[in-house]
Image: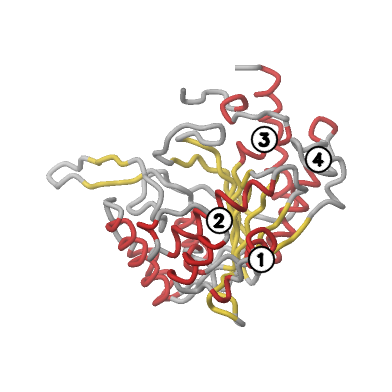
Amino acid sequence: MQYELIEKRFIIIKLIRDFFHSEGFTEVDTPLLCTSPGIEPYLEPFTTRCRFPGKKQKMYYLPYSPEFFMKRLLANGFNTIFQIAHCFRNEELSQFHQPEFLMLEWYRKNATYLNLMEDVKKLFTYISSFSHFNKLQNSKEHNNLTLSWEYISVKELFLRYLNINLDHCKESLPFYTQLIKAGIPVDPHFQNDWNTLFFSAFLNAIEPHLKGTAPLFITDYPASVSALAKTKSDDVFYAERFELYINTIEIVNGCTELTDYQEHLQRYQQCNAERTGSRKKPYPLDKVFLYAIKNDFPASAGAALGIDRLIMLFLDQNNISNIMPFPVY
């Protein structure tokens, strides 16, 4: 543990809190035991069992994010809320991954993903106004965050770097054919799995081009890889979702929230079908969450930010374990 780095970590966390309080947000806290971890077909959760006297044991999960609980708070009348939460993913260790990590999540009623991108810019600018944190690791124009933000849609990325028009690849086989034509190595086993084709192309052929870029908002992801995001009104193939990338590192994921109950249910079922197809256990439905969506959930937008990754960038570190006081090795 390096004292200086960890001290600066705690300062950045305080600055995040200060920023959201100054913006009029209410800080909330939610449970670490949940009955369903989320709608994420590719992630693995930590599980535990609670023993209740005279009753059967009950399975609980450690959450990927506080999303479901925070949305229930929105349904119960809260307007602008944020939380700094410990979250968990049962994944391999890497340069950018720890099984336990710190997540900032925030929501605005009567807002869209455009409002959240402005929140992100203001937050980064606020942190960088303090002398210790005025640069981002390996990012272009890193000393002036007010000027260096860039925007591009997923559709534009595929056209720019792969010469593939996703509008013509909304089915798996045409998409697979275009990826092969573009020289992208893809496993023929997945030629009928659109989402896997997309992630393979994005990770292997798009992300390498993002190295050294200015803070970049990638917008309008396909709806099929945007679990709980509202679809765009002019083309439901795409969703009102964004991710912020800095030097190939994903820092923020946000969207205009899906409010349609039936669509939520369908995406839950799709997630579980994908999990079953890849020999993973399906998730139980969070019936209380779905009830809130069906009856009281307002138009809103929400985002999640990986605090540990943000701290890595501001402290010019290349491994997430360097800036965590007690990393898993």
- The CA span between labels 3 and 2 is 36 Å
Q: Does label 3 or label 4 sit earlier along the sequence?
A: 4
Q: Is residue 76 visible?
A: no
Q: Does label 3 or label 2 sit earlier along the sequence?
A: 2
The residue at which mark 3 appears reads as 311
Point out which mark residue 183 bears.
Answer: 2
Point out which mark residue 159 bears.
Answer: 1
Residue 310 position in % (x across, y down): 66, 40
Q: Does label 2 or label 1 sit earlier along the sequence?
A: 1
Q: Amino acid at mark 4?
A: Ser
Q: Nearer the viewer, mark 2 or mark 1?
A: 2
Tell me the residue at 71%/19% (across/down).
4
- The CA span between labels 4 and 2 is 41 Å
Circles 2 and 1: CB distance less than 8 Å?
no
Q: Amino acid at mark 3?
A: Ile
The residue at which mark 4 appears reads as 128
Name the element at disc 2.
loop
Q: Quadrant of residue 140?
A: top right
